[in-house]
Image: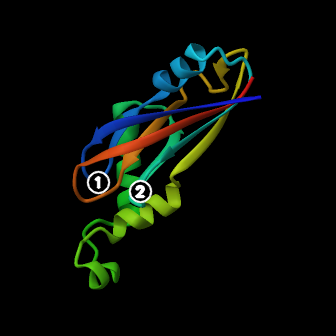
Amino acid sequence: MRVKSRLLSSFLKAKIGSVDITSEVQNFIMEENFSAGIVIISIKGSTGGITTIEYEPNLMKDYEELMEKIAPSDKPYHHTKTWGDYNGFSHLRSSLQKTSLSIPFVNGKLFLGTWQQIIVLNFDERDRDREILIQIIGE
């Protein structure tokens, strides 16, 4: 068994900025000559998220509308009393979405469906540079 890690940095827009990192993850697996195992992707911070979805503009609009219904950005949150910032909705969205994801791979290929991509999200009320850790465990 081997373990390899790579750190990515990505600039993401506010509220639901997103980027598809599927090809970066797949390329890393291939570059390191792994055949089977698990890749773990994690975003640093408590206002970001990672998921798989069909990364298509209209579906991403639907996703943004869903998050706005679940944790509205214009609602007052108790969190503001603690820090004076207005990103309580961001922390709630992150806790629901989660900040890490694991995906198996077989024969050097991610075990994903045709329309399934790995995306990283920024839920914060401001643009952010995000650090993303990709870690491969396998052979």
Q: Is residue 69 rendered to the left or right of residue 85? A: right
The tag on residue 45 is 2
| Mark pair 2, 1: CA separation | 14 Å
Residue 79 at x, y percent in the picture: 34, 79
The x, y position of residue 109, in whole percent, is: 65, 18
**Colouring:** rainbow
Count up the numbered dots.
2
Residue 19 in the image: x percent, y percent? 37, 35
Amino acid of disc 2: Gly
Which element type, helix, strand or loop, lies under badge 2?
A: loop
Q: Quadrant of residue 112?
A: top right
The residue under label 1 is which amino acid type?
A: Lys
Q: Residue at x 43, y 51 (%)?
A: 44
Q: Is residue 7 above or below residue 46?
A: above
Q: Looking at the picture, does residue 50 appear above or below residue 28?
A: below
For residue 3, what is the image quadrant? top right
Label pair 2/1, CB-CB below 8 angstroms: no
Q: Which residue is mark 1?
A: 15
Q: Of the residues under marks 2 and 1, which one precedes in the sequence?
A: 1
Q: Which residue corresponds to the image point at 51% horizontal and 54% vertical from the top-left?
A: 97
Marks 2, 1: nearer the viewer: 2
Q: Is residue 107 left or right of residue 26?
A: right
Q: Secondary structure at mark 1?
A: loop
Of residues 87 and 59, the one drawn nearer to the viewer in this rendering = 87
